[in-house]
Image (cartoon, rainbow, N blue to C red):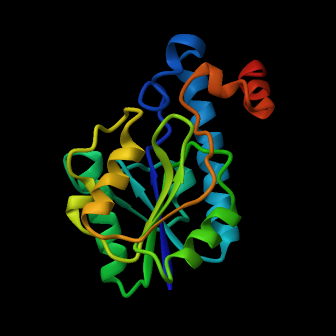
């Protein structure tokens, strides 16, 4: 069994897609985020894998009412990711995958391929154009994997791979995708441009 954890934030204006706010405003940025999160949930459902939401904080938003969810645990992103992966692996999963909620390039094929790769790799990553990654999967997890990673920088992927090398992990990289952080990213997705133009 492979488990998928979706890292997400409640889609409240002013708290999500903050790098977009100077260009399109807090309400439109929140609309973009909600669209991406709904897309991500649909991908997870269609993958056939078990999944649950790991929210940054509690929320009574109606979009979460029918979804299994819990609140992330930890002071920084690395600790929160480690705790979520460990929770899934401790629940008798053969592998655990974490994805974000702002990547329209991520598909069911990525999830299914990552699940297959974990049969003979300790780590699978879907690199992102910005130097991070949109998916991380582990068949075993060690807190050292997340040490000395400059989160939100263009070194996240390289530093994670370096940590994996020190742990003697077998690593598989799938094809690179684009996540959505800036106005330039939005321009690659006509559906998002139409969304903000109509609101």
Q: Quadrant of the C terminus?
A: top right
Q: Nearer the viewer, residue 58 or 89?
A: 89
Residue at the far top: name it. Answer: 22
Residue at 69% x, 64% y is 108
Residue 147 vs residue 53, the one in the foreground: 147
Answer yes or no: is residue 57 visible: no
Residue 58 in the image, given as x and y percentages of width and height: 35, 50
Looking at the rendering, which quadrant does residue 113 occupy? bottom right
Residue at the image position 43 percent from the left and 44 percent from the top: 9
Q: Can I make out residue 188 in this image?
A: yes
- The front one of 124 and 198 is 124
Q: Indicate the quadrant where residue 169 lies.
A: bottom left
Labels in figure, total: 0
Which of the 4 quarters of the picture holds residue 36?
A: top right
- Whole-percent x, y for residue 195 in the image: 74, 28
- Compared with 128, 23 (above or below) is above
Nearer to the camera, 71 or 82 = 82
Residue at 65% x, 68% y is: 45
User: At 75% from the left edge and 32% from the top edge, which residue is drawn?
Assistant: 189
How far across and how far down the image is residue 162, in percent?
32, 53
**Whole-percent x, y for residue 26 in the image:** 52, 20
**Is 25 placed above or below 189 here?**
above
């Amino acid at each position: 069994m492979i488990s998928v954890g979706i890292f997400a934030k409640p889609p409240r204006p002013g708290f999500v897609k903050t790098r977009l706010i100077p260009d399109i405003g807090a309400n439109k940025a929140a609309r973009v985020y909600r669209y991406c999160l709904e897309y991500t949930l649909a991908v997870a459902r269609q993958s056939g894998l078990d999944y649950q939401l790991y929210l940054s904080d509690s929320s009574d938003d109606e979009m979460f009412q029918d979804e299994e969810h819990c609140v992330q645990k930890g002071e920084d992103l690395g600790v929160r990711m480690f705790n979520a992966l460990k929770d899934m692996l401790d629940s008798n999963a053969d592998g655990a995958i974490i994805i974000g909620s702002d990547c329209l390039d991520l598909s069911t094929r990525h999830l299914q391929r990552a699940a297959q790769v974990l049969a003979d790799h300790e780590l699978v990553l879907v690199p992102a154009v910005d130097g991070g990654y949109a998916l991380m999967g582990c068949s075993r997890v060690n807190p050292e994997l997340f040490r000395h990673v400059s989160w939100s920088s263009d070194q996240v992927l390289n530093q994670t791979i370096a940590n994996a090398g020190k742990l003697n992990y077998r690593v598989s990289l799938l094809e690179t995708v684009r996540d959505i952080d800036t106005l330039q990213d939005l321009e690659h997705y006509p559906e998002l441009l139409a969304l903000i133009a109509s609101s």
